[in-house]
Amino acid sequence: MANKSFWEGSKHYLCERDLAQSFHMARVLGMPLLIEGEPGTGKTELPIQYANDTNSELFVYPVGSKSNIEQFVARFDHVKYLRDSQIEVLNAQREEKGLKTSLSTGGRNPNNLADYVAKGPAAKAFSSPNSVLLIDEIDKAPREFPNDLLYALSHRKFVMPESGEILEISEEEMPAIVITSNREQELPTAFKGRCIYHYIQFPDADTMRLIIEKHFEKLDDKVINVALDIFYHLRTIGLERAPTTRELLNWLKYSKQFSSKEAIEKMEKLDGLGALVKTQTDLERVQRMILTSPEDFKKRSNPN
């Protein structure tokens, strides 16, 4: 039976109620969950953490500018098929000459076309009932990919190339499908219509504190307070690329090697700035701010 229980997150993943509701609805209805939001809000982590927490098999398809439905579902290896067919002819000729040794095809049989079908993440997921399928950053794909994907997923079956094998799965055994997007381009309306949709808002300070506690159980509250004050200040000064949750966690992880007092002092000086700021322009801007107003960040991290 499919796992239709209401999943509320795991030890290392905070799944807010609205997101958990959308994810549950998608699994119950056998529909993909499309999650949009800015980078670093945990879109990709949801299916990964869910698969880990429920011991489900996970299949991942990272989308790129050259993605196509063949890569996603399955492709027929014509080169391998031609080579093995030639080997079969050579082996027949060797047998006629009385040679006992034969060339190997690696167990493949040219008469069985299914031996030459290389299954992609979709075909593998549909062959594994109640698995998890992540289609990551679909907004990077060519325009036709979401439309091709829409047809393939809505019919809950795939026809394997050349062999004609049909992979079909019931609504009950449908993989939990999560599709993520950073909204680099707008997705087709028809595609969105076939998905359960959720937009992840960037976490506020209180939610971020809960996320931090999921990752660092024994971190000093004072260190967290300073890190959060500086982090959210950096997000308000108009950087080209505002720091994300992932980067804050990396900064805090780095700080753990120091005592609380040392960590706070280093954070106030913005030591390890490269963990938070990711472009040359932003780096130079923040450094200028530190030089022109060296006490600014310290005051913000110690508001009282």
Image (cartoon, rainbow, N blue to C red):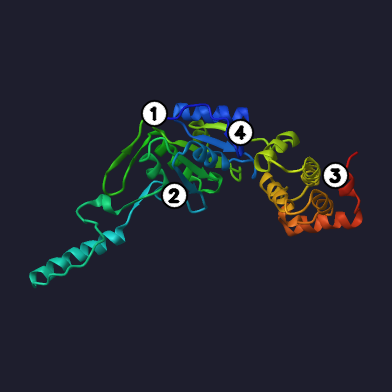
Alpha-carbon neighbours of circle 1 within 10 Å: few (<14), some, or many (≥20)? few
- Residue 287 falls in which quadrant of the image? bottom right
Q: Could you tell me the amino acid type at mark 3?
A: Ser
Report how far apart the C-alphas of labels 4 and 3 lie in the structure.
28 Å
**Sequence order check, earlier mark of 1 and 2:** 1
Q: Nearer the viewer, residue 13 or 23?
A: 13
* Residue 221, percent from left and from top: 78, 40
* Residue 241, percent from left and from top: 71, 50
Q: Quadrant of the N terminus?
A: top left
- Front: mark 1 or 2: 1
Q: Which mark is residue 10?
A: none
Q: Which residue is mark 2?
A: 68
**Sequence order check, earlier mark of 4 and 3:** 4
Q: Which residue is mark 4?
A: 15
SS state under label 3: helix
At 80% from the left and 59% from the top, the residue drawn is: 284
**Sequence order check, earlier mark of 3 and 1:** 1
Report how far apart the C-alphas of labels 3 and 2 lie in the structure.
48 Å
Report how far apart the C-alphas of labels 4 and 2 lie in the structure.
31 Å
Q: Which residue is mark 3?
A: 301
Q: Could you tell me the amino acid type at mark 2?
A: Asn
Above-or-below relation of 240 to 224: below
**Sequence order check, earlier mark of 4 and 1:** 1
